[in-house]
Amino acid sequence: MMEQEIINGHDTEIDVPEVRQNGVVNGEDSGNAGNEVNTGVDSVSADHRIKRKAKRLIKQLSKEVVTNGTSVIPSTRFLKNSRKPRNGFGRGLPKKGGAGGKGVWGKLGSELEEADVDMNDPNYDSDSLENGDIELKTIIPEMSEEDIQKSVEPILLEYFEHGDTQEAALAFEELTCGTKRFMIPMLAVEIALEHKPSHREMTSVLISDLYGRVVLQRDIAKAFDTLLKNLPDLILDTPEAPTVLGNFIARAVADDCLPPKYVQSYKDKQKDRGEDECDYAREALARADTLLSMKHGLVRLDNVWGVGGGLRPVKYLTRQMTLLLKEYLSSGDLHEAERCLQDLEVPHFHHELVYEAVVMTIEAINGHTEEMMCKLLKSFYAAIIITPDQLERGFLRVYEDMPDICVDVPLAYTVLERFVDRCQKGGFLTDEVIKRLPSRGRKRFVSEGDGGRVKTLDYV
């Protein structure tokens, strides 16, 4: 018997087996009451019998409906995307608070959680993490101390050439130093100890710009702790290492990279560990304490390394070169004169030294002075401290100013000619300079004849 049922809103025909009811089969009395009639179909058990009250099947329990053990009827899941729970309970809210399923926005506030960030995701961006290097250290191993030293040194030497702290910071950020980040400022100070004051000033600026971006305050403090312990070794290459390191400590305090109590805290840590503070470390800390305790010390520490070469006024540089030459004439020390000239860090202004040396020689009118100045210029020329173009420019400046110099020194032309001849024999004066040497003969007046004619400059 085919019977039409409504299941889940659809008309479905179900084959219902014929059973005996009150001894009547299909409206006929069999005469055998209490016995079932054989209709060619086995008796149906209670488990497979469809009950009238179950008008809707629960489809989430199985994807297929088995009726009589032989036929399989696929279910129709039209309520698949319904927000209502399929068990008949619930308030009609989204599943899992909107956090489950594909293509959903996620749970409210889940954008602030970083626990679900997958570093293997192609769209993973390490810059989105505030502590990115902490996450990356599980993937990229930290560099060894030897590798860090090999990487930091060329970056610093290149920084001394271009002076761009941002470019240097980007290069340092690419290094996976991890817990060894303190080696960056430590190596920077070690390299700066062997360079001139302008490079030390650049190093102090670099440490200040790296603070909070590449290194933290504890990293800078640990770097200076290590440097103070290594002073006995550093002083072998740089005799003034304690004084220079004290300047670095004071400048770091002035730049807010170190706390003001760092000097005292280092002494306290040494006492707590029971270690004896070395004399060099004590000298460096005393130097830093003196600079910090002087009046307006924090303001003055901006120029603790002096003003850089070309930034100083011309009058100051000229005065320093004059003092250098006077000290050389009194002492005769070529090495000290060379050191003082290089400390000025103005290679483009060395022609001023040549000019002052020649003028000082003319004004002295002394053979000893001429010999010493010739020896000085020859030494600087051989060491390529003064280049040929700077030497030529200095002599030509003297040639141009000879009319004014001759007013104060009447024998200026004679002394200049004698000094140029001495320099020519020294082998460092070019032929161009010698050819342009001015000469002035004795001017002849009307009383000496010549028909009453006065010599013009063309005949001088």
Image: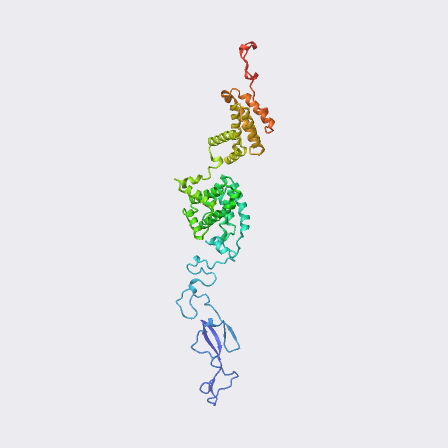
Q: Where is residue 7 in the image (x, y as percent from the top left)?
A: 45, 73
Q: Where is residue 33 in the image (x, y as percent from the top left)?
A: 46, 89
- Most foreground residue, 77 or 328: 328
Looking at the image, residue 362 lies above or below residue 114: above
Looking at the image, residue 320 lies above or below residue 201: above
Query: Is residue 213 shown to the viewer in this render?
Result: no
> Is 382 situated left or right of 228 in this image?
right
- Most foreground residue, 451 or 313: 313
Query: Is residue 221 shown to the viewer in this render?
Result: yes
Looking at the image, residue 62 lies above or below residue 234: below
Q: Residue furthest bottom?
A: 31
Q: Position of residue 385 (x, y in %)?
A: 55, 34
Rendered-image quadrant of the C terminus: top right
The structure residue drawn at horizontal position 48% and vertical position 52%, both measured from the top left corner, is: 127
Q: Where is residue 348 in the image (x, y as percent from the top left)?
A: 52, 33
- Most foreground residue, 61 or 161: 161
**Please, which colouring scheme is shown?**
rainbow
How many dots with numbers? 0
